[in-house]
Amino acid sequence: MAEEYDMKTNQLLLRKWREKNALGAYGNWQVEVGEPAGLAVGTLDCELIKESSTNPIFMRKDTKNSFQWRIRNLPYPKDVYSVSVEKDQRCCVIHTTNKKYYKKFSIPDLERFQLPLDCTALSFTHANNTLVITYQKPQEILDAEEELQKELKKIKAANDGDGECKTQ
């Protein structure tokens, strides 16, 4: 796992995971929080075939007190969307009444802490062709993140090339 934090606000910018495959080699990074690096360029390597720029883009961006998902390129009005919790499958479901969009997603942080989903913590808004889904963080996760921030303050941050390069 690799995480990137904003040094001024202590906000999580990126969290990604990578696991070994059956042969022991590392696979590709799976982005959990933040925007994937290749999103702006396109996900396909071939220049002849390119995915549409109007496809919905699903990404997670957390705030201090809530988990937040943003789905860009959804042009329908707010009353078309339905966001619900499926407690038996431990996931959230987004669907439209016009059957143009359907998405199931889990909250890995709640699964790691083995916490149940709460339908009252879930809300959504829609503006500028973007659906924003918000799930309020439970107190257990807020406490764990506070402990993590205390540990991170003890660690010296890696500079992005700002340090002097010593020559031999």
Image (cartoon, rainbow, N blue to C red):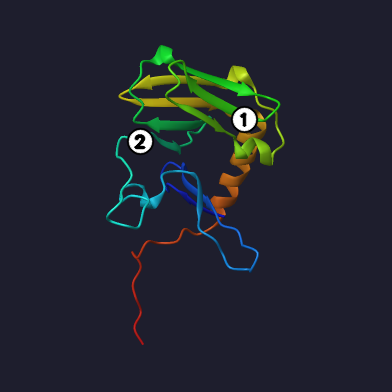
Image spot of residue 38 (x, y percent) = 37, 52
- Decide: is 63 above or below 20: above
Amino acid type, mark 2 = Asn
Amino acid type, mark 1 = Cys
Residue at the image position 63 percent from the left and 28 percent from the top: 138
Image spot of residue 120 (x, y percent) = 60, 17
Q: Residue furthest left?
A: 48
As drawn, is 43 to the left or to the right of 146? left
- Decide: is 57 above or below 76: below
Pointer 1 residue: 91
User: Mark 2 or 1 closer to N-term?
Assistant: 2
- Decide: is 45 above or below 53: below
Image spot of residue 104 (x, y percent) = 55, 31
Q: Nearer the viewer, residue 83 or 45?
A: 45
Residue 55 is tagged as 2
Residue 48's quadrant in the figure? bottom left
